[in-house]
Structures are given as C-alpha cells and as structure tokens.
Image (tube, grey):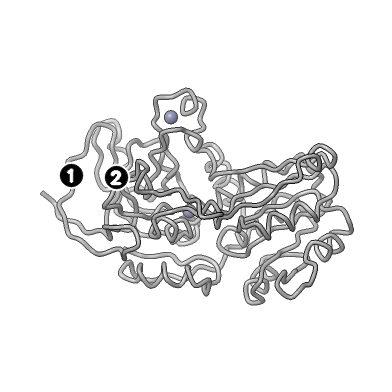
C-alpha cells in the first residue's frame, strides 16, 4: 500500500502536525489528486480555534458538528489526477485540475438543483472531509474537477474559495446599477479578489475599506478607485457616504463584525444591497423598520456553486483580471502561515506547496 503524508489538526486549539499514513483504496467514482498548490484561508483559523463567535458569549462549537477529528484542513486546492476508482475516469489521469471544495450530500433536492454549497449535510473538502494540507487528497467524483487552462496554479487555487465567494457575492449585487458606488470592506484575500473581479464585471466606482494602509495600497494596485482607512476616520459611515457621492448601492462585507455591518447599514442609499461573507463574528442590533423604509437587502452569502466556479474560471481565463498578491511556501510552513493570518500581517494569499 502506498504511503503518503498530511498535516492533521488533532485537537481544537492545537497546531496541525505532520503524519505519515497509507493511502486508502479508492472507491467507485473517487479520484486521487497529488496536491501541488493549496491556499490558506481565514476559515482554517476559526476551525483551528474550534468555534465561531456569535457574540454575547455565544458560540458554535465545531466539536458538536459533523466535522471529523483529526482533520486535514485546506480547501483551495490545485493538483494532478494520479489515480481513479472507476475505469470511466481513466481519461483524467495526468490532468492538472482545480477542485470544487463545497460538496453537499449529493442526495437532497438542494444538491440536485446544483446548490451543493447550501446543502444541510455539507461534505466540504478540508472541513467535513479530509482536505488539501497533504500530499494527496481524495475527491468523490470527477465532476468536481475544473480545468484551469494556462492560469498560474498558485493564483488559480485561490479561486475555489476567496475568488468564488466574492464572485457569487458580486453576482448578487448585479441588479444594482454598476455605475453607482460599490464598497468592499476588508482587504484580506477575499476583499482583494473582489476588487479586481468587480473591475472586470463593470463596477466603475469601487471603494476599498480597511484598517491597515498596506492592505489599502494593495487594493489601489488592483484598481480600487477610492480608499478608506476606517480606523483613522472619526465617522467612517459619513466618510464612506461622501466618497460614494451619497449613492452607495452595493456593499460586500468580508469582515463581518458589528462595526462593519453598522457602518454599511448607515452608509448605503435607499434600495441598496449589503452582502455579508465575513465570519469574524459578534452580535448587533437591527432597527427593523429601517429595512423596509430604506428598501435595504441584507444578504448572507456562503461560497458559491459548482456552476459559478466554472463561470468564474471562464471569466478569469478571458484575461484582464489582476491576480491578488500570492506568496508561496512549502507545506511544512502551515503552522506559521495560520499564525501570520491570525495576526493579520499577510497581504493577499499564502499558498503552500506540498
Ligand atoms: Zn476559504
Ligand atoms: Zn445535499
């Protein structure tokens, strides 16, 4: 039996450790991937902590969820197909592919409608099944393999989560006039991906918001039209409103804390949409009548569908979209990469090479 290695999280609050183990026999339809690039996402920091903060002392404890432990995290994966469980999939051997990680149960009506990412029994790679911080990863079926053509695999892997999440969020803003202002809050991997995608999708007045000037500089290089350091501003909501010329119709909040949600609600014009993708957590009060009075849509969005990921790859392969900054490190740097992400001192994405 072939031997492989992976980085396992063995307890919440601990560090992933390298383990050597044998590769399981492939079941029917399964595909074995030799991982070459895997992006480090902020969700992995929350998984490592073992909970999601709901504010006021409330938490979602992952120990009470269906997440396996030990767990190999890592869900932004590009690799090569090295073995298949079914003869019909032989043609895939040798192909370089991006993996769609947001699989559902594959049995329910939601999955049948193509919304795996909304399945009540999620099977996501690196969260509910073993993921890509490893030499090898197993995918349940060939339909989750996507052709990235000649895209740089170090950037392409980030499309599976940071790219897809903001692409889906931007699509949900599209009824909003693209000529009016769009604010993107948080210039981490998601926010920076959103800037260059929003440009390509025709948004012409993009305001980047963050508390760190070096991240705002990165946003400017990717095409942000205005920058707002919300930490330096005494009234960031008024500052945002005036940068938007009182016509802020779209917000993507990739942070998701009370301060960012309140800023967005107070800065937007009537008829606006606010899409929340950030998971930092907390609780906030909602003045309910202001939602109907202001015709405000507050939308939560989690990743995106398999169809959206193929649409995103097609869009990126057309060209004209700047890559977010990517720094590559060997897989053994995973603990440091998670710690750098936790401290907030990375620009763009860290991508590991197993
Ligand atoms: Zn992610
Ligand atoms: Zn399902």
Extreme-top residue of the structure: 109
Query: Which residue: 80% across, 48% down?
Result: 249
Q: What residue is disc 1 on?
A: 24
- Determine the secondary structure under disc 1: loop
Marks 2 and 1 close (CB-CB < 8 Å) = yes
Q: Residue at x 33, y 55 (%)?
A: 35
The answer to whether residue 4 is above or below residue 221 is above
In the picture as drawn, the residue positioned furthest to the front comes out as 56
Q: In the picture shown, does residue 122 fall above or below 322?
A: above
Residue 138 is tagged as 2
Nearest the viewer among 7 and 3 is 7
The residue depicted at 10 percent of the width and 49 percent of the height is: 1
Number of marks present in the image shown: 2
Check disc 2 and report its element: helix, strand or loop.
strand
Label whose residue precedes the other's in the sequence (2 or 1): 1
Image spot of residue 18 (x, y percent):
24, 64
Q: Residue 264 at x, y = what percent?
A: 74, 54
Classify residue 207 as left or right of residue 127.
right
**How far across and how far down the image is residue 95, in percent?**
35, 47
Residue 72: x %, y % from top left: 31, 54
User: Dot 1, crowdedness within 10 Å: few (<14), some or many (≥20)?
Assistant: few
**Nearer to the camera, 173 or 52:** 52
């Amino acid at each position: 039996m072939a031997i492989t290695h992976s980085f396992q999280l063995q307890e919440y609050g601990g560090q992933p450790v390298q383990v050597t183990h044998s590769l399981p026999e492939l079941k029917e339809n399964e595909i074995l991937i030799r991982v070459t690039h895997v992006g480090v996402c902020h969700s992995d920091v929350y998984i490592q902590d073992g909970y999601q903060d709901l504010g006021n002392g409330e938490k979602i404890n992952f120990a009470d969820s269906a997440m396996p432990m030990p767990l190999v995290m890592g869900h932004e994966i590009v690799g090569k197909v090295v073995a298949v469980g079914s003869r019909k999939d032989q043609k895939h051997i040798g192909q370089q592919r991006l993996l769609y990680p947001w699989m559902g149960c594959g049995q329910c009506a939601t999955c049948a409608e193509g919304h795996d990412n909304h399945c009540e029994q999620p099977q996501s790679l690196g969260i509910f099944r073993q993921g890509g911080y490893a030499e090898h990863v197993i995918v349940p079926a060939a339909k989750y393999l996507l052709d990235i053509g000649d895209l740089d695999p170090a950037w392409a892997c980030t499309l599976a989560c940071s790219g897809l999440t903001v692409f889906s969020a931007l699509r949900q803003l599209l009824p909003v006039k693209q000529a009016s202002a769009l604010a993107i809050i948080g210039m981490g991997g998601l926010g920076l991906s959103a800037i260059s995608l929003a440009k390509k999708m025709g948004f012409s007045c993009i305001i980047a918001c963050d508390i760190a000037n070096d991240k705002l500089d990165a946003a400017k290089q990717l095409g942000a039209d205005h920058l707002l350091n919300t930490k330096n501003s005494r009234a960031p909501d008024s500052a945002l409103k005036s940068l938007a010329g009182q016509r802020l119709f779209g917000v993507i909040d990739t942070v998701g804390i009370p301060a960012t949600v309140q800023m967005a609600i107070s800065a937007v014009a009537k008829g606006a949409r606010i899409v929340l993708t950030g998971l930092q957590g907390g609780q906030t009060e909602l003045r309910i009548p202001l939602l109907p009075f202001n015709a405000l849509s507050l939308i939560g969005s989690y990743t995106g569908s398999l169809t959206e990921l193929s649409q995103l790859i097609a869009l990126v392969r057309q060209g004209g979209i700047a890559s977010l900054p990517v720094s590559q490190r060997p897989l053994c740097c995973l603990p440091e990469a998670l710690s750098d992400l936790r401290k907030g001192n990375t620009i763009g994405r860290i991508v590991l090479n197993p």
